[in-house]
Image: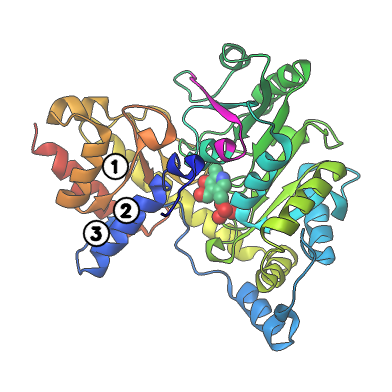
Amino acid sequence: DMKISQRSQQLQPSATMKISAQAKQMIAEGLDVINLGIGEPDFETPKNIEEAAIAAINDGKASFYTPAAGLADLRTSVAKRTAADYGLTDLSAKNVAITTGAKMALYATFQTILDPGDEVLLPEPYWVSYAEQIKLAGGVPVPVPVGETFKATTKDLAAKLTDRTVAFLLNSPENPTGVIYDREELSALNDWTKAHDLMVITDDIYGQLTYNGATFTSIAQLSDHLDPRIVIITGASKTYSMTGWRMGYAIADASLISKISAFLSHATGNPTAVSQYALLEALAGEQGQVELMREAFEDRLNTIYPLLTEIPGFSLPVKPQGAFYLFPDVSEALKLSGIKTTGELVSRLLNEAHVALVDGTAFGVQNHVRISYATDLASLKTAMARIKDFMLQFK
Ligand code: PLP
């Protein structure tokens, strides 16, 4: 008979990808559904990047295996760029592993640092894949409840610290809340993790998507040398609108990167060659498009946020500063409508209002939904009007 491992039996498909697939199916059936479910920029990848990939194919460069952790030139380019952006000295190709999306950078990192039973602190709400990936590596995800600001403090973390804790996962700007930790907050977290000798995995993938004057600081930039306890995870998906190309990277101490590279050599062999040539151009080429896309997201946030706050039962007192999500509290909406769970609310909004959102329980917390604003302004306005109309029927 067929056999499925215990490990796989416990695994749930990504909730964000599931709702998005459902919405795409409804759209394919001819229904006018607005998909605010997925975390994917709606822009086509900038032309110079696409053309570099086509040139690599035409030159025959995309046909072959590359080193497991990526092309030497690309690793050097990422090292230089990170050194400049983060103000870190002594970064070189040896500190960089290019991976099949930031997802694989995270996966390889957990596989490389975790032993069975090792605990990782995850501030709530947290991105769905962290917890599943930690479990797949034999580790234990430890959700950390945080206060109203959505930001973890050392007190929050201390409440969940045990002698099995080995790492803390930080995501800023954060999916799904859009909050950004400031330097002072990061400094406190850094000192605390240092005192408890914890690794810090900092997922900086939304670092270039900050709005209305907010700035991004990574916990990795508090000193001018990369601390061996810190692993930076980032990638091209969000910044360059390159989700389909699957280009991410881990930046860490050279000895850790060499282990990550050994893992990758067995897992993926190498990240797709043509995508690496595309990433080379993304990093080296003209950056004007990046700013245009950022401005478009800022405009969308500034349009959608006031509309959201007018929806009965949806509450989000603090306007987010980064990424491209809103994570309102919908406790009142549940009360007003008599709908029992956020799962049911999301399902009724999809079927009756034709707007796809994500149930906040996918991020480990109750009474919230996630709204992605990575879509055009007209659709966002229509979607907010539809949700408002849906809620007004209960008034
Ligand atoms: N980290 C966070 C917080 C994300 O939201 C995502 C994508 O949704 C990723 C990592 C992974 O991105 P990718 O694998 O496309 O590079």
Pointer 1 with pointer 2, Cβ within 8 A: yes
SS state under label 2? helix
Q: CA distance from mark 3 to mark 1?
A: 19 Å
* Image quadrant where residue 238 sits: bottom right
Tell me where the magenta segment starts and ends, as one range: 134-146
Image location (x, y in percent) of residue 30: 20, 69
Image location (x, y in percent) of residue 212: 52, 42
Q: Amino acid at mark 1?
A: Leu
Pointer 3 with pointer 1, Cβ within 8 A: no
Q: Amino acid at mark 2?
A: Leu
Tag nearer the camera, 1 or 2: 2
Q: Inspect this view and state whether residue 25 appears.
A: yes
Tag nearer the camera, 3 or 2: 3
Q: Is residue 137 above or below residue 281?
A: above
CB at disc 2 and ligand 1 closer than 8 Å: no
Q: Nearer the viewer, residue 259 or 74?
A: 259
Q: Which mark is residue 380?
A: 2
Image location (x, y in percent) of residue 99: 68, 56
Q: Which mark is residue 307?
A: 1
Q: CA distance from mark 1 to mark 2?
A: 9 Å
Q: Is 299 placed left or right of 341 in the picture?
A: right
Q: Amino acid at mark 3?
A: Val
Say which label, 1 or 2, has the lower sequence index: 1
SS state under label 1? helix
Q: Which mark is residue 33?
A: 3
Q: CA distance from mark 3 to mark 2?
A: 12 Å
Q: Nearer the viewer, residue 36 or 384?
A: 36
Q: Is residue 60 above or below residue 262?
A: below
Pointer 3 with pointer 2, Cβ within 8 A: no
SS state under label 3? loop
Q: Is residue 267 above or below residue 43?
A: above
